[in-house]
């Protein structure tokens, strides 16, 4: 095990808090991260609630800087990956709008409805098809 890995693990053990995983967004904390999502992807707080699957109260707490639980952070990581995937095929500023419009690729459901039904793989499959040039 490298010295850096041991130091990271020991710092986590001492503080009890995992390191902030979203520095690649230019954010310094969870409140800043959610503000970045809203600005870059034009998503609303309500859309963030639907995308993460957690309560409006939880998302409001993150917006105030409270760190999420490990399970909640996992949902944020998945949402972050989704935003990156979508930004590869559509303009970042159009993501929020795209999420709320019925899509024939999802049998007329909105992408948010697809996420809420636990069918995120359908969105990933669509992204793969678009990026690879394969017919859907």
Image (cartoon, helix red, strand yellow):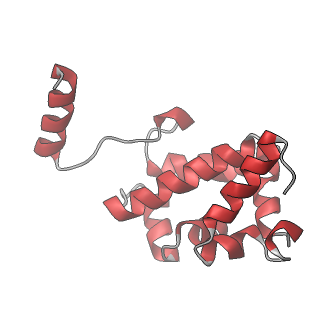
- Snapshot quadrant of residue 98: bottom right
Compared to 124, does 133 lie above or below? Answer: above
Quadrant position of the C terminus in the picture: bottom right
Specify whether 63 is left or right of 98: left
Q: Give me the residue at 37% from left, 60% from top.
A: 68
Residue 20 rendering spot, x and y as whole percentages: 37, 42
Specify whether 71 is left or right of 115: left
Residue 43 rendering spot, x and y as whole percentages: 70, 59
Residue 23 rendering spot, x and y as whole percentages: 47, 35
Residue 28 rendering spot, x and y as whole percentages: 45, 38
Q: Residue furthest front?
A: 134
Compared to 102, does 66 lie above or below? Answer: above
Q: Give me the residue at 16% from left, 28% from top.
A: 7
- Snapshot quadrant of residue 132: top right
Specify whether 38 is left or right of 64: right
Q: Give me the residue at 49% from left, 67% from top.
A: 60
Q: Give me the residue at 47% from left, 61% from top.
A: 75
């Amino acid at each position: 095990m490298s010295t850096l890995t041991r130091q990271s693990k020991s710092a986590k053990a001492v503080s009890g808090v995992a390191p902030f995983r979203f520095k690649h967004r230019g954010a310094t904390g969870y409140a800043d991260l959610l503000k970045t999502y809203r600005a870059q992807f034009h998503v609303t707080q309500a859309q963030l609630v639907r995308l993460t699957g957690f309560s409006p109260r939880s998302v409001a707490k993150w917006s105030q800087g409270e760190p999420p639980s490990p399970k909640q952070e996992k949902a944020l990581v998945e949402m972050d990956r989704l935003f990156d995937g979508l930004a590869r095929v559509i303009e970042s500023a159009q993501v929020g709008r795209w999420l709320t419009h019925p899509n024939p690729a999802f049998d007329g459901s909105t992408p948010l409805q697809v996420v809420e039904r636990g069918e995120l793989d359908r969105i990933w499959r669509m992204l793969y098809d678009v990026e690879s040039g394969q017919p859907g």
